[in-house]
Image (cartoon, grey):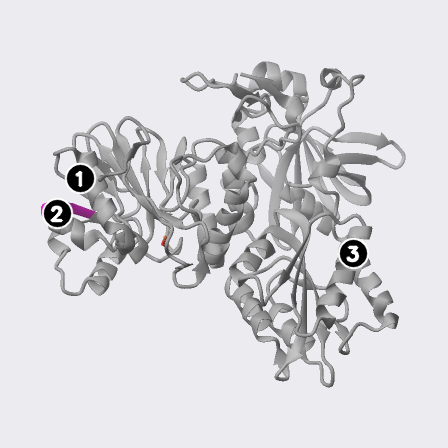
Amino acid sequence: MECIQNITKELIFVGTSDRRMALFENVYPIPTGVSYNSYLLLDEQTVLFDTVDRSVADQFYANVAAALDGRTLDFVIIQHMEPDHCASLEGLLLRYPNLTIVCNAKTVTMMKQFFPSCDFENNCYVVKEGDILAVGKHTLTFVMAPMVHWPEVMVTYDTTDKILFSADAFGGFGALSGNLFADEADLTSGYMDEMRRYYTNIVGKYGTQVQTLLKKAAGIDIRMICPLHGLIWRTGLGDLIDKYTHWATYTPEENGVVIAYASVYGGTENTVNILASKLAERGVKRIRMFDVSVTHPSYIVAEAFRCSHLVFASTTYNAGIFVNMENLLHDLAAHNFQNRTVAFIENGTWAPTAGKLMREIIGGLKGVTVLDETLTVRSALHPSQKESLEIMADAIAAGLTQTVEETVAPANANLNPAAMFKLSYGLFLLSAKDKGKDNACIINTVTQLTDIPKRVSVAVNKSNLTHDMILSDGRFNVSVLTESVPFDFFKQYGFQSGRLLDKFEGQDGIVRAENGILYTTKYANAYLSCTVIATVDCGTHTLFIASVDAAEVLSDEPSVTYAYYFAHIKPRPQPAPEKKTGYVCKICGYVYEGESLPEDFICPLCKHGVEDFEKL
Ligand code: FEO
């Protein structure tokens, strides 16, 4: 008996879930099961997006037949040749022998390997990047996505309904239980934990390739994402892509500490318990502890991708690292673990070696900072070593800035946020350079502080790459924007992340100042080159106080103000054609769907807070 559901009028979910399997890919525990998604498009011609795993094939065949309702199947698009999605291809061809298989050249090669006794070649229609398939009302465009997660992977964009069929990307562990769609709550729910675990363990190694796909996706209007595992996304897409951007660029999602430990008789465990309590005493809220002998490494890898700091503590075993810890560390290295701060604790009753060996595996990974010396415990922590733990806790806590909860403003009946809109601002392009990379963002916070000597301040959101670059390099340029600046300029520099692209590429009027940092001469009437002399942590932002080293007037055109931008440059947000309940960002037009806007919500596109949203 079939079990199918409509996603749109013409698109039907024909996949199904497996709750019996213990280990996905025979490696990863899936206590909540896994879904194998397949979608059938009923147009003038019928199109199936991928098949399913062998274990659920019978249900799948019944679903396809029921959804077709007597029609024949014209096309199956094979986006990913891994058997969890294509094992049912042979059975499908037996049922629909005139079926055309739409795939790329690499898929054909794999098809012959997986099904050596079948001759599929006469059924194949080979496509490449940008090719389209018109099947009636719907036009499908094929986009290659190599190594997300295998080399033959491609995704498909339905330009008619603006649906991205994303293959493994945006998938997650967990069987589907009736409801096919994710909602905003799933961005922070246990489902997101399983999405993160799926991403980091399955695709985590291929961050560069995922970034390439995200760049391609940034150029298209996506209203719905249909992955091959897990929930379908049609809301919160900006936040979802923001998660993927963090994961693909190996950027921590949050300031927090993962403590992974291997302990045989409790001495190591006791040591990390004391460390955790000392971190808590210092105000660190997000501390996650894992006994590597108890927790499967896939969960710890996922948390390692989430958090900024990690502590690895291992007893010495067979003159090496305890086996489960060694496995975890190699697993992290294999998944391209990088850009984190780590500390090591070793234990050894007669010849401790685990610390040195752990450091050899993790210490040399890209962007990994190792804190101070390894703490060596001899059987059990000696009272004299408490001071060493205090120092380690100090070093870790010092690297953790305020948590999101701490930055949420308490309700204040005497504070009308609308009053803040009466302040006047200019608009500026803030540019920086660090480790050979150029980047810039739009800000409205440049203020002259003193005339002799000439000093300015700029406040920059901590989530901006430009912020991190200024913090690292200590210098920046400011271009004062003029009233002729078009909205596209704000889209170019303000609504996308420099972690994914070179914002200056292809832009006119870009000049490198004497300090080596780029600035724009187009749409600007002046520029300043500055050196940071002090910073103030303001929670969500850092205030940089800087001396002005160089400055020049570029034109006499009036400077653009925030008020002018709203009145003359920013297009009015276009409400979606269907009636929506939600809030629209007055800065960039991003729409948050939902009855109420969380008070700590930050626009995923332009990073403005709730005060810049208005009800639809
Ligand atoms: Fe879900 Fe890479 O297969």
Q: What element carries label 2?
A: helix
Kindly indicate whether the residue at mark 3 contacts the one at mark 2 (C-beta within 8 angstroms): no
The numbered mark, 2 or 3, whose residue comes first in the sequence reads 2
Tell me where the magenta segment starts and ends, as one range. 97-101
The reply, left or right, for residue 502 in relation to residue 27 is right
Residue 458, numbered circle: none
Q: Nearer the viewer, residue 445 or 331?
A: 331
Quarter holding ligand 1:
bottom left
**Measured from the top left, where is residue 165 in percent x and y?**
34, 40
Distance from the alpha carbon under mark 2 to that under mark 1: 9 Å
Q: Determine which residue is flagged by label 3.
A: 277
Kindly identify the amino acid type of the residue bearing the numbered disc 2. Arg
Q: Residues within 10 Å of mark 1 (few under 14, many from 20)?
A: some
| Residue 143 visible in rendering | no
Kindly identify the amino acid type of the residue bearing the numbered disc 1. Ala
Q: Is mark 3 on a helix, strand or loop?
A: helix
Kindly indicate whether the residue at mark 1 contacts the one at mark 2 (C-beta within 8 angstroms): yes
Q: Determine which residue is flagged by label 1.
A: 65
The reply, left or right, for residue 437 in relation to residue 26 is right
The reply, left or right, for residue 279 in relation to residue 525 is right
Residue at the spot 50% in from the left edge and 43% down from the top edge: 191
Q: Nearer the viewer, residue 614 or 355?
A: 355
The reply, left or right, for residue 198 in relation to residue 555 is left
| Residue 588 visible in rendering | yes
Q: How crowded is mark 3: few (under 14 residues within 10 Å), some or many (20 or more)?
A: some
Q: Determine which residue is flagged by label 2.
A: 95
Say how many tags the image has: 3
Q: Quadrant of residue 522?
A: top right
Kindly identify the amino acid type of the residue bearing the numbered disc 3. Ser
